[in-house]
Amino acid sequence: MFPFKNQGKLYSRLFLTMTMTVTITIAAVSSLLYINFERLALGLVHNYDKDSLLQVSYSATLMNDSVKVLALQAYFDPLIAKLLYRKAAPDELTEALARLTAYRNTSPFIDSIYIYNASRDVFYSTLVDYGEQRAQDFFDSGIVQTYRARVQGTTSIKPFLPIPRLMPNPYKPYTEGESRSVYSYLFSDSDWSSGIPQEAIVINVSAERMNSIIAALESGGQKNTFIIDKEGHTVTAQAGSPVGTDRRNDSVIERILGSRMTSGFFVEQARGEKALVSYISHEPNGWIFVRVTPYGQVLAQLTQWKQWTFGLAALILLLGVAGAFLLSRKLFQPIGRMMTELSGLKTEKRSMHALRLQELMKSLLLGEQVIPAETLRKKLAELDHPFTDQGSFCLLLMKLDHHAAFCESYPPRDRQLLKFGIGNIARELSKPYARSNVVELEEDSLVLILQLRPVGPGEANCDLVPLSRSIQEAVRTYIRQSTSIVISPPVSSLQQIDLLYQEVQEGAAYRVYAGHECVIDVQSEVRSRKEAETYEYPQHLEKRLTDAMMLGKPDAVMEGYRAMVEDAASYEPRVLRMMLTRLLLALEDTSRARGNGPEPFHFPTCMSEMAKLETLTDIHAYFTTRLERCMLQSRTRQQDKYEELLQQIQAYVGVHYSNPALSIEQIAEQVNMSPVYLGRLYKKLTSQSFSDYVNEVRLNEVKKLLAETDEPIVLIMEKAGFVSQGYFFTLFKKMNGLTPGEYRERNRKCFV
């Protein structure tokens, strides 16, 4: 009697323990799921916020590009140039300011434009009543101080980048506010590092544009979006925080500035409330875009699910305790012992079978032995493997992408565990479609052997491409590893998989064209490429490339390299590798011939490094880097050659400008070049046509003689090389704003 009671109590306790274990497990799993869901929710909200912040970032980039284009238009405008480089006449000043106002009106977000004439220390502005002012009297003293600090090198402000600041309100009596927020851009065509004041264009962009974009993206919810710079100062105005406010002591800003990542998110107390903070950096402007979302808004629904889950776990616990005392206690310990022994034997047998099965599959894949069909069936039966004689067999070769980085990131033991995890994922996902087994034959790959299930009437054949994609996605999600998969054609017997293994090995080479994380169907991919036997090495393209290297023509070098790769890429991968090997030898010889030694095309080193390149993108990056390094010295020599050519042209014009027949053909003959090419090259190098340069030299000589002599104007014109009086007088007034007689009279008065 007592043994029965004790046995009943024992099993009641066991059942109670199991119930509590299940309940605790449910609670623990629910907690983990909640944590994961919480992270997922945070990630989803962050991705949404990140997309919104990227739109703001794109708008900032567009604003930079638009302002840059506007500044360049103004620089090359002859009317604006009069404001920049000399004192404009009253009618010229009016016309130039009107043109400047027209530029300002081209974009609604341009607040105002200033022109600074360094030689006169004068600012011109598009603002009404502020057309021309001395720098010391200019109403916007802030930009004057910023400009002088930039010239003196006491600030790190870079050109072509916005400067957030408060600009004084120029219409204070008529509009509200002491100041308004703008982003100012400083542009100059001279070197700031000289320490000498330079002419500049200042374009002020209204900060309201950025604020309106942010407001449009904040529609719905209680989100707060703002911009700071890398020093922690606000770039956009907020309630109680004008532009330029120092927020480095704010815990949120402090954490963002301390991060080394260009984008991310975290949870932090913001203004006394727990919140999700997302941020991205905008490197061109040195800005950081920040969005703060209340935490409760993110997890409202998830919190309700948590309460329901823990309530369900408590109910299961109560029901389990009651069931522990109501269920039968008539269980026998011998059964428990027997089950334990059987479980141990089964585990040991399974381990032995797994090792023997791996050896058998490796032997079949490598074709090391021929096993009769009947013997193979018996061995599979002994090993409890589900492969049968029905259905077709195929292989999925899973190649690990970025294998060199994979080996550097993990020690051997961890790599083995990760590959084991990849194999498990592949087996689980293929279960609905096929019986499977995973074999590891090489360091960078796994082979998934599939026996596809027989297709019944009305059922579709299994498409291995979607299966391959699902395996890649799962491996990327859980293992964080990119894989490329090669699909073999089917065969009807397991004894033929050694042939399939050879095919997928050859198909894996096509990853060089398909790129990382590709799915390659061996049959279709091989048919899409030309056979290697029909390939002819493009000796003429190689010669064009090496000749361009010898002549120092980087564009032609890159064009020749791309042509050779494009030609070889239409063939099998081994053709591409063979072509690159021959090209390396040619590049090494050419590098030696140019006197640079074998670098950067040392053949043994490059061959070793090329073996690690997996895709055409990797190969392009590798060769482009080395070709650019090789051509750097050539570019320097080319620039010296152009400078020497310009000196020859200017010297020739300086001697023969008085010859009315002076032409580009005469100089082209002197330098042994085509006149058309020489004219285009001169304009490209100087942004001025040859005829304009000759006229400029002749007009300078005319002005000199007008000011220093009493010779007749017509005689001076002829001495300078002009023939047509009408053309001369028109050109002189156009370039100087005065007739020759007026110019002589004015300069004599100034001289007196």
Image: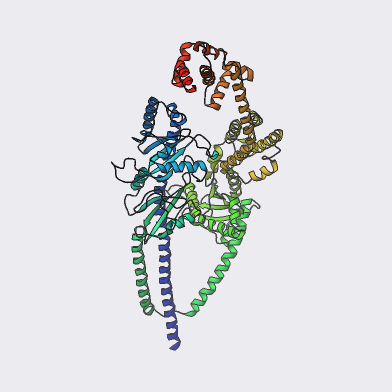
Work out whether 706 lies above or below 367.
above
Location of residue 273 with respect to 57 vertically, above or below: below
Task: Name the spot of residue 137 as percent of width and height, x first.
Answer: 40, 39
Instruction: Please say whether residue 387 is visible from this viewpoint.
Output: no
Considering every residue shown, the one lying at the far left of the view is 174
Left or right: 714 in relation to 240 = right
- Say whether residue 271 is left or right of residue 592: left
On screen, residue 86 above or below 724: below
* Coordinates of residue 372 in the picture (x, y in percent): 62, 53
Residue 561, quarter of the rendered image: top right
Q: Nearer the viewer, residue 617 or 210?
A: 210
Q: Where does residue 75 sit, x and y in percent of width and height? A: 46, 31
Of residues 375 and 369, the one drawn nearer to the viewer in this rendering: 369
Position above or below: 70 against 348: above
Between 505 and 220, the one lying in front of the other is 220
Q: How many marks?
A: 0
Q: Residue at x 31, y 51 (%)?
A: 220
Residue 585: % across, % down: 69, 37
Residue 682 in view here:
yes
